[in-house]
Image: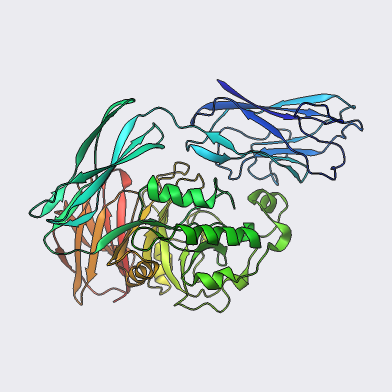
Amino acid sequence: MKRALVALAVLTGAAALGYVLLSEKPPETPPSVAVDIRGTEVGQVTRIELTLTAGPGGLSAGRTLRVGFPHWVYGSRGVRPPPRVDRLGWGRWYFVELTPELAPGASHIINLRPFRLPQTAGDGFRPLVFLDWEQLPTEPVALEAGKAAGLSVIAPSMWTQGEEFAVHRRLVDAFGNVLEVTREDKEPLSGEGIVPFSVSLDGPQGHFAGQSHPSLFVDDAPPRVAWLDLHGHSGLSDGRGRPEEYFRVARHESLLDGAALSDHDWQLDDAEMKQLLAATEAAYEPGAFVTIPALEINVNGHEVAYFLDSARLAGVAKGSSGGARTIHDETDRGLDTAKVPDVLADYGDADILVATHTSLARGMGTAYPLNRPLPGYHLFEVYSAHGSSECAGCPRRVAGADGDPDTATLWDALDTGHALTLIAAGDGHDGRPGDPAWGAVRGGLTAVEVDELTRESVAEALLLGRSWATTGERTILQSRWTDTGVRVRFVSEEPAQALEVIGDRRVIARLDAPSPGVWLDIPLEPTEWRYVRLLLPNGARAWAGAHRP
């Protein structure tokens, strides 16, 4: 078992050799904490030991020592506060203990139960240590990827016969961390059809072979299918890593066509919001990679707002109401989540798109009917790494309470009269957009059909419903609504179990074992609302819609 050591002690003069300055009364200069985590390969089981040493004035009993990380899920499985600590009011900390009385120079050693480090490599895994509510600064810890374990292959989803194209090979470790990305150019193909690509890679780490998701080759000029992760977090709020690294991973490792970094508005001060926006703008390269300025906001629960007019977002002056700066602050102090109404002030549908958060839990899911109208409310996040918010009883259902108005489903939203485009995202907090490894399930992806890869074309595709959501697979699910029904074309890695149209809370049309790669015409009866879903093995799905005739 690898061992991590966090040493907390009193610094007297120039002594103490790099330990931490803690005293009964907070010092004028913020203390620093020495963190030494040995064996930093992802997925390792780690033990943390804390040594608390009192200063010349000793340490009074009953002060609160808290240890955690930016988001509760990192390593928290199996780590709980000791039984003697009242769990109510402590939040999801890895460790909470009331300090004993210590004489000057005396030490108290605390051992946390073993936990597993996050599965995502990279910088930004930063332990949080608090004495009462004084946060002690810590350095981010770099987690190293493991040895090569497989080859994943990314190919174009749709392509025109006769055109040159390329596939990308990603050498990954056992947890999906990307070790190397190489490009392999392909000769133009003739004819039409569905083609998966088998590729191999030989190198110092061995021989690896992999196969891509299927590509659809057609004889006409198809729209470009762009793949996006529209929801994720960095170390500016409760995620990991820098905003710049978030977009680098999205583009060059996850091989996405676009991404949105949507840190929590209430966790950002003005400088951090400007930092987020600057990184978003710097990573935007029209025609190659799209970024959309975004924030996770709190109005009817949690929503994600996409600001199509970034100049207006840059002028927003905010700040945290209630003083909450972390989820731990909010939970432990009993504060209401800070709401920043001026973020949405005077915005109209042309300036903003708003999506629900998945219906995760009370206070996070968007309740229906909406308590407060939202400008640009056109999107519904049907799936993320938390699970599916489609309906009660659906596979991979988000762990929310059925019947709770704050854990409402897509069907509840459609019943209230909203015409919503369905999207899926990662909501990753581990610095790996497009392929998060931290949630209850695999994160989702959104595909859009565009003529050019720009913010404007992506927004138009979402508004017009020329898009679809998946449970993370690069499944094609095109839909075209008509006066009498819907035309659908799909391509999937695994044979589809069924193609369904859902209307007014029931299946109104179903094709079992449908044929991929061809347009299927499905006549429909009248309904108030409807959308398409593709059922794949093991609970995987894709959704397109929703449509109001």
Question: What is the x, y in percent for residue 451?
Answer: 27, 67
Question: What is the x, y in percent for residue 515?
Answer: 14, 54
Q: Residue at x 65, y 51 (%)?
A: 326
Horizontal side of 79 relative to 148 (left or right) equals right
Q: Residue extending furthest top?
A: 1
Residue situated in front as seen by the camera: 240 or 201: 201
Residue situated in front as seen by the camera: 104 or 172: 172
Which part of the image, by quadrant, shows the N terminus? top right
Q: Residue at x 51, y 36 (%)?
A: 118
Residue situated in front as seen by the camera: 378 or 3: 3
Horizontal side of 54 relative to 234 (left or right) equals right
Quarter assignment of residue 258: bottom left
Q: In this rendering, is residue 364 above or below 353?
A: above
Residue situated in front as seen by the camera: 282 or 336: 282
Quarter assignment of residue 460: bottom left
- In the rendered image, is residue 98 in sight? yes
Q: Residue extending furthest left?
A: 191
Question: What is the x, y in percent for residue 173?
Answer: 39, 32
Identify the colour scheme used: rainbow
Horizontal side of 50 relative to 177 (left or right) equals right
Which part of the image, by quadrant, shows the C terminus? bottom left
Question: What is the x, y in percent for residue 501?
Answer: 25, 63
- In the rendered image, is residue 398 in sight? no
Q: How many marks?
A: 0
Horizontal side of 385 relative to 45 (left or right) equals left
